[in-house]
Amino acid sequence: MTFISCLGISQKPAQATSIIAIDEYHGQKIEDPYRTLENLEDSTVIDWLQEQGKYAFNLSQKIFTFFYLQLRIYFIVFAMRNHLYFALFIVVKLEYIK
């Protein structure tokens, strides 16, 4: 599955290896394709979890950066329209604090 974000970046999370386990409960067979992910000591599961963490962190960083940019533009436009140069000064100063 591939996602296209509002940032125009194609993102693809790491896929987990799936081995279908079939259990029988009360005469009905139930498939569990995620049984392999229950073993938290397996190196493939650990690697997959680490990749998921990296993917989520990178995605959240991009979203925050995009949000911060939108917020900065909003404050600059607001300050220019309303002649609030003090607000513009604060926004510019925040850039150097990070």
Image (spheres, helix red, strand yellow):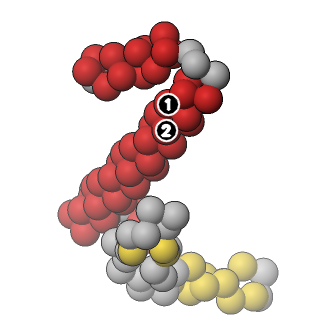
Check contact, mark 1 vs mark 2: CB within 8 A.
yes
Left or right of residue 7, residue 46 in this image: left
State the image quarter where residue 27 is shown: bottom right
Q: Residue at x 39, y 74 (%)?
A: 10
Left or right of residue 71, residue 30 in this image: right
Mark 1 and mark 2: Cα distance apart in space: 5 Å
Front residue of 7/45: it is 7
Residue 4 appearing in the image: yes
Q: Residue at x 48, y 74 (%)?
A: 4
- Residue matched to label 2: 73
Q: Secondary structure at mark 2?
A: helix
Q: Position of residue 61 (x, y in %)?
A: 37, 45
- Residue matched to label 1: 76
Residue 60 appearing in the image: no
The label shown at residue 40 is: none
Q: Amino acid at mark 2?
A: Ile
Front residue of 85/34: it is 85
Q: Position of residue 42 (x, y in %)?
A: 26, 63
